[in-house]
Image: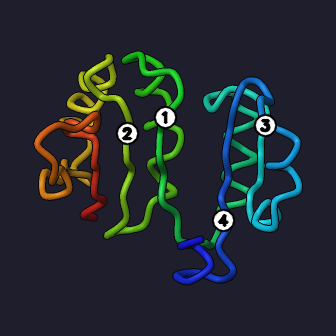
């Protein structure tokens, strides 16, 4: 796993509203590096749990749950402060509905900018979805 090479003490926090993990994923050798949280990514208890786990750590956020404008806007509002300068929030499946939330977030928040240099493929599901923290 790439995480083992880059950050041996690193962790992955994943959030889902349902536990659809197959039994072998729970016993995989790398499962000990993954914290599975059950609930909505925007629920106050889940947000607090993530913030507690991430405190004092370098964080990369990947948003790939409910792709509506409102939900993505809530996720950005809840998690943006965890990302350090030079770090990223990556939003998946932006053409589905998240792109408006992204544009509004960037327009209202000068700490982040859209990094088009990360869109290297001819076709992407991350249109304007790489937000780099610049301050």
Neighbours of disc 3 within 10 Å: few (<14), some (14-19), many (20+): few
Q: Residue at x 51, y 57 (%)?
A: 82
- What whole-number distance in Å separates the C-alpha atoms at marks 2 and 1? 6 Å
**Image point 39% across, 50% down: which residue?**
89
Q: Earlier in the sequence, mark 4 or mark 2?
A: 4
Asked if residue 57 is positioned above or below residue 132 in the image, the reply reads: below
The label on residue 91 is: 2
**Closer to us: mark 3 or mark 1?**
3
Task: Compute the Cα span from label 3 to label 2.
Answer: 22 Å
Instruction: Tell me: 14 left or right of 28.
Output: left
Image quadrant where one finds the C terminus: bottom left
- Give me the disc on residue 64: 1
Judge depth for marks 4 and 1 and give the one in front. 1
Q: Earlier in the sequence, mark 3 or mark 2?
A: 3
Quadrant housing residue 39: top right
Q: Are marks 2 and 1 in contact (CB under 8 Å)?
A: yes
Residue underneath mark 3: 21
Which of the two discs, 3 and 1, labels the residue nearer the N terminus? Answer: 3
Q: Position of residue 91 (x, y in %)?
A: 37, 39
Q: Which residue is mark 4?
A: 55
Disc 3 versus disc 1: distance between alpha carbons? Answer: 16 Å
Displayed quadrant of residue 44: top right
Q: How far apart, in angstroms, are the residues tagged by discs 4 and 1?
A: 22 Å
Q: CA distance from mark 4 to mark 2?
A: 22 Å
Of labels 2 and 1, earlier in sequence is 1
- Picture layout, residue 94 above or below residue 61: above
Residue 10 horizontal/vertical position (percent): 65, 73
Checking the image for residue 113, the label placed there is none
The image position of residue 79, as x and y in percent, is 52, 45
């Amino acid at each position: 796993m790439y995480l083992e090479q880059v950050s041996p003490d690193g962790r992955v926090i994943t959030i889902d509203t349902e536990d659809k993990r197959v039994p072998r994923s729970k016993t995989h050798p790398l499962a000990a590096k993954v914290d599975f949280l059950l609930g909505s990514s925007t629920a106050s208890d889940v947000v607090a749990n993530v913030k507690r786990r991430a405190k004092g750590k370098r964080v990369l956020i990947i948003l790939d749950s409910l792709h509506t404008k409102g939900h993505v806007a809530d996720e950005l509002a809840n998690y943006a402060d965890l990302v350090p300068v030079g770090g990223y929030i990556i939003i998946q499946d932006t053409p589905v509905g998240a792109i408006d939330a992204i544009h509004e977030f960037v327009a209202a928040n000068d700490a982040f900018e859209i990094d088009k240099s990360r869109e290297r493929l001819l076709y992407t599901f991350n249109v304007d979805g790489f937000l780099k923290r610049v301050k």
